[in-house]
Amino acid sequence: MTDTQSREITKADVDKFLFGKHLTSCAVCGRFRSKCDLDVHTLSCQRGATPDCSSSSTLNVLMIVCHNCGAIEFHDRTIIAKWLDSQRVTQLV
Ligand SMILES: [Zn+2]
């Protein structure tokens, strides 16, 4: 059984996501991105005890760094994982 929360998201996965969403150029320098043009780092932080958040869930974020200009973008890891899952389902049908 695959756990969406803990499964490793590779650079290739992120690449697939970005291309699938047509986010293929850097928002800052406009450079077309491919696998070799970005760095992916997984960040996680504990959500603080905010009034609107009942549980102290861990927030997982993917930090994507443009190799050309160093601009940093953040993408919610959960959203990417879900998108990848939906793509996988589509492929099976
Ligand atoms: Zn850039």
Image (cartoon, helix red, strand yellow):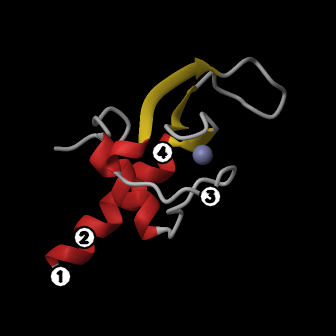
- Residue occupied by mark 1: 93
- Is the residue 61 above or below the residue 91 in the image? above
The alpha-carbon separation of the residues under discs 3 and 2 comes to 32 Å
Q: Earlier in the sequence, mark 3 or mark 2?
A: 3
Q: Earlier in the sequence, mark 1 or mark 4?
A: 4
Q: Is mark 3 within 8 Å of ligand 1?
A: yes
The residue located at (30%, 68%) in the rendering is: 87
Residue ranking furthest to the bottom:
93
Amino acid type, label 2? Val
The residue located at (32%, 32%) in the rendering is: 6
Q: Within 10 angstroms of label 2, few (less than 14), some, or many (20 or more) residues? A: few
Q: Please state if 72 lies on the left or on the right of 42 as rendered.
A: right
Q: Earlier in the sequence, mark 1 or mark 3?
A: 3
Amino acid type, label 1? Val
What SS does tag 4 mark? helix
- Residue occupied by mark 2: 89
Q: Within 10 angstroms of label 3, few (less than 14), some, or many (20 or more) residues? A: few
The alpha-carbon separation of the residues under discs 3 and 4 comes to 26 Å
Numbered label attached to residue 30: 3
Numbered label attached to residue 68: none
The residue located at (41%, 55%) in the rendering is: 82
Q: Quadrant of the N terminus?
A: top left
Q: Nearer the viewer, mark 3 or mark 4?
A: 3
- Return the residue nearer the eye: 51 or 78: 78
The alpha-carbon separation of the residues under discs 1 and 3 comes to 36 Å
- Give percent across and percent down for residue 45: 59, 19
- Is the residue 2 above or below the residue 83 in the image? above
